[in-house]
Amino acid sequence: MPAKSSSEFVARMEDILETYALPYDPEIPLICMDEQPVQLLDHSHPPEPMKPGKVCREDYEYVRKGSCSLFLFTEPLAGWRHVRVSERRTKSDWAEQVRELLEVHYPKAKRVRLVMDNLNTHTISSLYETFTPDLALSLAKRLEIHYTPKHGSWLNIAEIELSALTVQCLHRRINSMEQLQREATAWEADRNQAQKSVHWHFTTEQARGKLKHLYPVI
């Protein structure tokens, strides 16, 4: 990794790790966000249902029914997550998801610490391209954005939640956005009810020891 890229990675990594180390503050919640494309698939032939002594059988062939995106927000320290299915993943789609996060889920928070990757749609300018200047500014003033480094998606707790969603909910054919939203909502409700959470243990001190090859030599 080039020296400049290495230093940028280290700077963003330590910023994320220090943010994760902050104590719980209900007025300034820490939210991690990630998104994932999903291929919608249907059966080419009706599957044979499960019977006594026989497992469910389905044809290996399938029919493509298009694609969509999942937006996932999670507050690790509260054991909360929210999943929304979207037809696309444009700037305006991201902006609408952020507006819902701030106005619906966290209307009383002074501001939100938002951890996410540095995708070109994940910017304050997306708010201004979607909403009126007054609304965009009011939303932007309540955001404290922390970007994960390039090739550092493992630092985003929302990615861990998306992995759990994929394994537990998306391991079968789902043929429509409506069905996908129902499945994701049921998964979300179950995990929120149980207050499932990701307990982050990797610290800045550990990073400086285990990943010292990434640090520039002074």
Image (cartoon, rainbow, N blue to C red):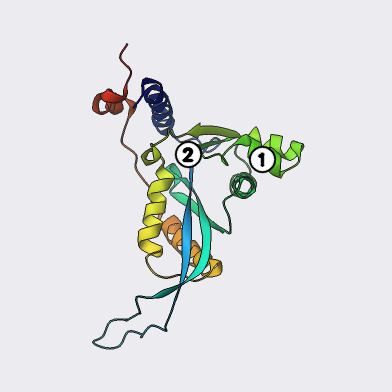
Q: Quadrant of the C terminus?
A: top left
- Residue found at x 49% / y 71%: 175
**Tag 1, which secondary structure?**
helix
Decide: is 30 above or below 101. Answer: above
- Work out which residue is located at the far bottom of the displayed protein and give it: 52
**Tag 2, which secondary structure?**
loop
Q: Is residue 24 left or right of residue 123?
A: left
Whole-percent x and y of residue 157?
40, 43
- Residue found at x 44% / y 35%: 148
Q: Is residue 207 left or right of residue 20?
A: left
Badge 2 amino acid: Asp
Mark with earlier residue (2, 1): 2
- Work out which residue is located at the far top of the displayed protein and give it: 218
Badge 1 amino acid: Leu
Q: CA distance from mark 2 to mark 1?
A: 17 Å
Indicate the quadrant where residue 166 lies.
Answer: bottom left
Whole-percent x and y of residue 59?
35, 79
Q: How many numbered marks, from 0 up?
A: 2
Which mark identifies residue 117? 2
Whole-percent x and y of residue 201?
31, 36
- What residue would you read off at disc 1? 127
Indicate the quadrant where residue 212 lies.
Answer: top left
Whole-percent x and y of residue 215?
32, 21
Q: Quadrant of the N terminus?
A: top left
The answer to whether residue 58 is seen in the rendering is yes
Pick the residue in front: 66 or 163: 66
Q: Residues within 10 Å of mark 1 (few under 14, many from 20)?
A: many
Decide: is 140 above or below 72. Answer: above
Pick the residue in front: 30 or 6: 6
